[in-house]
Amino acid sequence: MKIWIEKQQHLIDFTLASLARRKLKNLGLLTVYTLLVFVLASVALYTHALRTEAQKVLAGSPEIVLQRLVAGRHDLIPPGYLEQIGRIRGVQKMEGRLWGYYYDNVVKANYSFMAPRDLNIARGEIIVGPALERSRGLAAGNGISFRSYSGELHTFIVADVLPQTSELVSADLVLMHEADFRAFFKIPDGHYNDIAMSVANPQEVRNVAIKLLTTLPDSRPILRDEVLRTYASIFDWREGIMLALLSAAILAFGIFAWEKAAGLSAEEKREIGILKAIGWETGDVIKMKFWEGLLISLLAFLLGYVAAYLHVFHMDAILFEPVLKGWAVLYPRFTLPPHIDGLQVATLFFFTVFPYTAAVLVPIWRAATTDPDTVMRS
Amino acid sequence: MRPAHRVLIVFALAIGSFALTFVDAARLRAGNEIASADMRQLVERLGLTDPVLFTEARYTRHPTQADLQSAFQDHPVALEHFPTGSLVPPPAGILKAYENLDRKTAAPD
């Protein structure tokens, strides 16, 4: 074992000396290689973390949201629907939701107005999200007026601001009393925007949705699974677009690396010829080149991955942020907790380290098995 | 020190940093647990269905929910013109000139 280790050390010594003879070319290759791993790892890490965080947070969203459609359009839920749903077996809890959008032409952004049932908000008061606090300079005790869609001006006092830690889901919220909400949007009593419900047995969600469709044919149930799938698709789409844009760069690198790895220069051929002439075995030459490929590709992978991790989770992914998470006038400020997918990292490792190491070996094997005299003369 | 030892040290440092990223990720996740729990609680309490990522228009705020207006329906054959559908924000200079035409609107989009 000791002899084997000693032999490998000598081979690495020789490989390093050989790499140092073509220092500029090899350093260039290492830099480009590292950069490519950095970009791919940044995209993979960021998208996976964002997707996981969205799924984790939305795991608490309603199991079923029931909407009503009139002529293919979303319409208000009229009185009587809640009673009919209450008679369906399996529905554990249901609640009519009141929510809507308000376009604020001061900051040119949409707010989400909501009248939550189980939050104690006094009439004439509102609780606002942290992005509103920032964009409109609001604080508890301040007054703010909104012109409703009917043209009336409604003034509210800010009772509280939602915590900054929940900004990802609450940035643009304006929570108010049910009566204020109905007065602002002119929604009659007993009408709701939609109905959120939970099901006693999670295995039965689909069956309950089918029963809902049978009982209320003009309704559209949206399941939590579909909500989660929508977000997975949105982030997959953005990741895909990013990778499609990068595909030309990846291809260019592939050609460059293949040319470097698979095509031997005259100098390298001469080197192999000399090594063989002074008594190196074919196996030793191949091992030396194997070390060369492994050292370059493994170092590029490690440096690229660590740089990507720092870029994404300690520098807020400044380079790709707008592409990967989108942007908006009222954008939440949130810190993305790192969720690393081991399989994704392993895949990246496999596709960056193995092809290059393998590509290095093929021409070397061909050159190393040829007569040294022929190799040196060619 | 022979070159092989030097390169071994470089690799030991790189592999160590690689392993540290997983330790650091666990540390950051643990530090963020309270914020995540707060958010989950708020989502459950208010029955929220979407994160606040795309706020430009009614039809982009809750992609998982239907709306009175859907994408492309501001007027017939209208292409979605909100930044949500684009990849990168426009440069500040262009946005300034564009503001004169578009961002003075008082009506909701």
Image (cartoon, grey):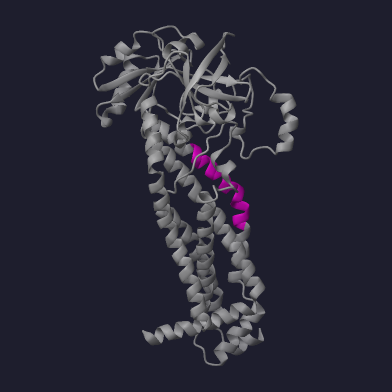
Q: Which quadrant holds residue A31?
A: bottom right
Figure check: B3 above or below B96: below
Magenta residues, start to end? A234-251
Is B12 inside the magenta-drawn segment? no
Q: Residue at x 50, y 67 (%)?
A: A298
Figure check: B91 above or below A343: above
Whether residue A286 can be seen here? no
Q: Residue at x 29, y 21 (%)?
A: A93
Q: Position of residue A378 (x, y in %)?
A: 66, 83
User: Which residue is nearer to you in this view: A322 or A145?
Assistant: A145
Q: Which SS type dominates the magenta stretch?
A: helix
Figure check: A339 above or below A155: below
The answer to whether A378 appears left or right of A54 in the picture is right
Is A239 inside the magenta-drawn segment? yes
The answer to whether A301 appears left or right of B42 in the picture is right
Q: Quadrant of the N terminus of chain A?
A: bottom left
Q: Residue at x 45, y 41 (%)?
A: A51
